[in-house]
Image (tube, rainbow, N blue to C red):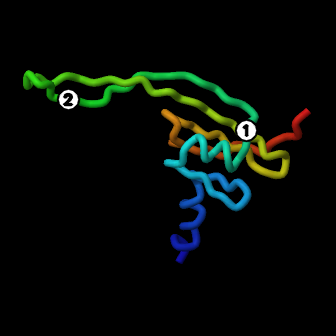
Amino acid sequence: MIVLGCLPTVLMADSIRCGSRIISRGSSSAELAAFCGDPAQVTKSSSYAGGGRVRGADGVEYGTTGEIMVEIWTYNFGPNALMERVRIENGVVVQIDSLGYGYNEP
């Protein structure tokens, strides 16, 4: 019974409610912006990741790498709600973390 009672909390851990919409992992950055508005802060970077092996036409296996565009959006929903940090890779939400309570904008 305890496990079933905690299930909704676990399911909502990687999501944000914006009005009547829920943004979760796999949502696009366009959906996030449309439903939650502009973030209070945006940090952009890029990284390279190995993509595995590809067999070429000559039968030789080659390693693949690709650039990943990373954005960290931080939402401040005010002092009565938790702030949310959203990691976006190549335009797709991959991680959502709840931070401490927000603050009033100056």
Question: Amino acid type of disc 2?
Answer: Val
Give left or right: position of 73 versus 69. right
Residue 16 place in picture, x, y as percent? 65, 52
Q: Earlier in the sequence, mark 2 or mark 1?
A: 1
Q: Quadrant of residue 66?
A: top left
Give left or right: position of 21 versus 104. left
Q: Which sits in the foreground, 18 or 11?
A: 18
Q: Quadrant of residue 7?
A: bottom right
Q: Residue furthest right?
A: 106
Q: Residue furthest bottom?
A: 1
Residue 88 place in picture, x, y as percent? 55, 36
Q: Which sits in the foreground, 76 or 37?
A: 37
Residue 38 marker: 1
Q: Residue at x 58, y 72 (%)?
A: 5
Categorize mark 1 by other alpha carbons within 10 Å: few (<14), some (14-19), many (20+). some
Residue that carries the numbered disc 2 in the rendered image: 54
Q: Residue at x 50, y 22 (%)?
A: 46
Give left or right: position of 102 versus 91. right
Residue 83 place in picture, x, y as percent? 73, 44
Question: Amino acid type of disc 1?
Answer: Asp
Q: Residue furthest left?
A: 59
Q: Residue at x 54, y 42 (%)?
A: 93
Label 1 secondary element? loop
Q: Quadrant of residue 54?
A: top left
Residue 21 marker: none
Residue 27 place in picture, x, y as percent? 54, 48
CA gap, disc 2 and disc 1: 39 Å
Q: Residue at x 55, y 60 (%)?
A: 10
- Quadrant placement of the C terminus: top right
Is 68 above or below relative to 28? above
Categorize mark 2 by other alpha carbons within 10 Å: few (<14), some (14-19), many (20+). few
Label 2 secondary element? strand
